[in-house]
């Protein structure tokens, strides 16, 4: 019985781990401090910010060291695009 419960719980929580990144439309903030904190809460540790094509680009990585570029609208603080760096 315990083995079945552990298996069931692991299957329930595994998808949440896979989607532990911000989503397009999430508001993370317009300043580095707020954006860094919000992205960290979403599972993306910020390495650096830079401006790109009128957007704020946050270069970050997840717990498995997979790298991402998260684009943020500087007026609203909303995530507009997320790219995986392969």
Image (cartoon, rainbow, N blue to C red):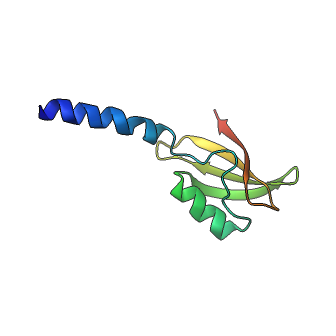
Position of residue 15 measured from the top left corner of the image (x, y, whole percent): 44, 35
Position of residue 84 measured from the top left corner of the image (x, y, whole percent): 65, 37
Along the line of sight, the residue nearer the viewer: 9 or 20: 9
Quarter placement of the N terminus: top left
Q: In this view, does 62 lie to the left or right of 79?
A: left
- Residue drawn at x 63%, y 45% is 23
Q: In this view, does 8 lie above or below 17?
A: above
- Numbered-mark total: 0
- Residue drawn at x 66%, y 59% is 28
Position of residue 48 measured from the top left corner of the image (x, y, whole percent): 67, 58
Q: Is residue 10 above or below residue 26?
A: above
Quarter placement of the C terminus: top right
The quarter of the picture where residue 74 lies is bottom right
The quarter of the picture where residue 17 lies is top left
Along the line of sight, the residue nearer the viewer: 78 or 51: 78
Q: In this view, does 56 lie to the left or right of 22?
A: right
Q: Is residue 1 above or below residue 43?
A: above
Residue projecting furthest to the right: 53
- Residue drawn at x 72%, y 58% is 49
Along the line of sight, the residue nearer the viewer: 65 or 41: 41
Q: In this view, does 46 lie to the left or right of 50?
A: left
Q: In this view, does 34 lie to the left or right of 71?
A: left
Position of residue 79 measured from the top left corner of the image (x, y, whole percent): 71, 51
């Amino acid at each position: 019985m315990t083995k079945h419960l552990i298996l069931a719980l692991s299957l329930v929580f595994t998808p949440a781990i896979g989607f532990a990144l911000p989503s397009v439309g999430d508001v993370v903030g317009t300043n580095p401090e707020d954006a860094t904190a919000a992205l960290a809460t979403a599972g993306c540790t910020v390495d650096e910010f830079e401006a790109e094509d009128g957007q704020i680009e946050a270069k970050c990585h997840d717990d498995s060291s997979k790298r991402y570029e998260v684009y943020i609208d500087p007026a609203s603080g909303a995530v507009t695009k997320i790219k995986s760096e392969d």
